[in-house]
Image: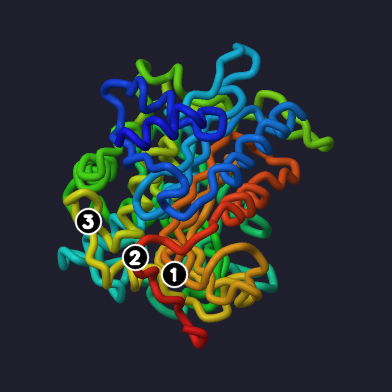
Amino acid sequence: MRLLRLRLAAGCGALVLCGWLAAPAPLVSQPLAPAAPESVGLSSSRLAKIGKVIREYVDAGRVAGTVTLVARNGRVAHLEAAGSLDVERHAPMPVNAIFRIASMSKAITSVGVMMLVEDGRIALSDPVSKFIPAFAKTTVRDTDGSAPVPARRAITIRDLLTHTSGLSYGQGAIADRYKAAGFTAWYFADKSEPIGSWIERLAALPFEAQPGERYVYGYSIDVLGYVIEKASGLTFDAFLRTRIFEPLKMSDTSFFLPEAKESRLATVYSAGSDGRIQPSTDPIFGQGAYVRGPRVAFSGGAGLLSTASDYGRFLQMLLNGGELEGARLLSPKTVELMTANHVGQLYLDGRFGFGLGFEIVEDVGRAGRYGSRGAFGWGGAYYTQFWVDPHEKLVSVFMTQLLPSGGNNLQEVFRALVYQSIVAPPEGPAAPRRGSDQ
């Protein structure tokens, strides 16, 4: 540990872990253990490019601020805040800033479902109507614009996990029906009724596609949040808190924020046509109702708030095969099932696979980006992103608040900068690559 402290003290400009080590904040989620980059096969000088490039984006007015995390072999080699939490208030971004993670909530909800599968309370083949009777008879919009037609078969739990249920966010030809029913895309933080009431009404609306026939991104994971309530006997927020957040020591992850933590909530910015940012004034998707809202609608698809460190702990649990620091949430075989392709060529024409909650890299060339076969991840509407690379024993988290992002490419750049920092194999045997080149 003495060697680590000396190295960090000498390299504070490249590795912002030094300040974090010197003055750990009390009553904050437990971060993963830090590591000098070289001890986990990363280059300090190459890793330092992340902060340098992000500061260039900040200086150019293309992003207000970020928190980025890179862990390898279960230890954090990079945890860095850049830019501002709130530009107008001249508030610097802290490493424990809290972000609206939107669709990064989906991975957590999917894990919750699979925990109940392991408990024997849910089966992947179960019809959703077993838990929500309103889903016994659903309809699908007809392509010729006539009255909706009955679904050809029941929607299953697996359909929801893989986004093949046919449920969209109510765009296109069915937009007026969804709007009239009060649905506002993926956003529920301002709703004054519990999520179950919304899901019951959702079942009566026409869906976008027949079950199992297409990959359609939408309310599927919100439905699963209600399924969790029905199957567990707990409210959804209580289930996540007691079964996932507390065991993983994710004390800064929740649906709504205590006022005492409001000073750490990052401001949402919007990018204009020129790519430059200004504070979001969107009445729905802007700063939101996460602090002073009704606090009753728990959205499993897009409702959570979290920090880079908290989410990094969640991802490390998955990379470890379902366990972190003695807390086992899932078995390794369940994680393996979740990170296998379940949809064939349905997702992005087969460029990627899609599992039970995650986008899956099956072929690096076909994916066309840095990574390894078997890597999995996802992102959120506020321009947040994560991925896990089992072959490299790598966890990466990118947090900011930018909606719309205006064509910003910083996530792609961050991914490249993470991978270019790898200069040696991970400690111990890496996970095997999946597929024919194994």
Element class at badge 1: loop
Name the residue: 37% across, 31% down: 5
Name the residue: 23% across, 61% down: 330
Image vertical order of residue 369 relative to residue 22, above or below: below
Q: Which of 130 and 261 lies nearest the eye of the viewer?
A: 261
Give the Cα separation between the discs numbered 1 and 2: 27 Å
Q: Residue furthest top?
A: 89
Mark nearer the viewer, 1 or 2:
2
Give the Cα separation between the discs numbered 3 and 1: 18 Å
Amino acid type, mark 2: Gly
Q: Position of residue 47 (x, y in %)?
A: 57, 44
Q: Say which quarter of the image contains residue 14.
A: top right
> Which label's residue is closer to the chain start, 1 or 2?
1
Q: Which of 133 and 241 lies nearest the eye of the viewer?
A: 241
Q: Is residue 384 visible?
A: yes
Amino acid type, mark 1: Gly
Q: Say which quarter of the image contains residue 184.
A: top right
Q: Residue furthest right?
A: 274
Q: Label 2: which residue? A: 428
Q: Position of residue 294 (x, y in %)?
A: 38, 27
Is residue 248 found left or right of 138 in the rendered image?
left
Element class at badge 2: loop
Q: Label 3: which residue? A: 329
